[in-house]
Amino acid sequence: MSTTNTQKTSGAFIAASWIALGVGMAGFIIGLWRSEMLLSEKGYYFTVLMYGLFAAVSVQKSVRDRLEGIPVTAIYYGISWFSTILAIVLLVVGLWNATLLPSEKGFYAFAFLLGIFGAIAVQKNTRDMQIFESGSSFSKPSDQ
């Protein structure tokens, strides 16, 4: 079975993906910068954001690799999913226990989720463009 990307990703979707990533990250980071949290709290939330972005990209890559027949170890696949879920749980626990207004908690939650979505979409678009520009297609390895 062959998976071929024959269409070029639209410029609008690429732009929307980068904007989602940029707005999510910038909003979250500017919110931290301007907050009156302790430096250790700011560091916690910044680390959770970076960990979440990296984990989401790892999930996207490992899921896509598996769909294209590229070997992905079960441990890496599992750790990618675990890390993504853990980053979300760490954010939820942190916000639940934070002494912030509910509107601030919501702001951080939505900025985080927008950044995660943007990171996944940017990773997908980057990979799609590389495949499109190389003119190659991926197919599952056959048993020969």
Image: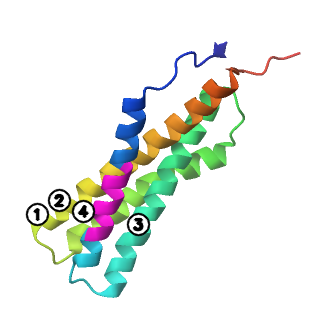
Q: Quadrant of the C terminus?
A: top right
In space, the residues marked 3 and 2 are separated at their CA atoms by: 16 Å
Residue occupying the point 44% across, 39% down: 121
Q: Are marks 1 and 2 in contact (CB under 8 Å)?
A: yes
Image location of residue 29, percent across then percent down: 33, 68
Q: Which residues are magenta?
A: 21-30
The secondary element bearing badge 2 is classed as helix
The secondary element bearing badge 3 is classed as helix
Residue density around tag 1, few if under 14, some if 14–19, many if 20 or more, within 10 Å = few
Residue occupying the point 58% across, 19% down: 5
In space, the residues marked 1 and 3 are separated at their CA atoms by: 19 Å
Q: Amino acid at mark 2?
A: Gly
Question: Is residue 23 one of those drawn in magenta?
Answer: yes
Residue density around tag 3, few if under 14, some if 14–19, many if 20 or more, within 10 Å = many
Residue occupying the point 41% across, 66% down: 48
According to the picture, the residue beneath numbered tag 2 turns out to be: 106
- Which comes sooner in the sequence, label 4 or label 1? 1
According to the picture, the residue beneath numbered tag 4 turns out to be: 108
In space, the residues marked 4 and 1 are separated at their CA atoms by: 9 Å
In space, the residues marked 1 and 2 are separated at their CA atoms by: 5 Å
Instruction: From the image, give the main secondary structure of the stretch colored magenta.
Output: helix
Q: Is residue 105 left or right of residue 52?
A: left
Image location of residue 86, percent across then percent down: 43, 58
Mark number displayed over residue 103? 1
Q: Amino acid at mark 4?
A: Tyr
Q: Is residue 58 left or right of residue 93?
A: right
Q: Amino acid at mark 3?
A: Val
In space, the residues marked 4 and 3 are separated at their CA atoms by: 11 Å
Residue placed most toward the observer, 96 or 39:
39
- Which comes sooner in the sequence, label 3 or label 2? 3
Q: Amino acid at mark 1?
A: Ser
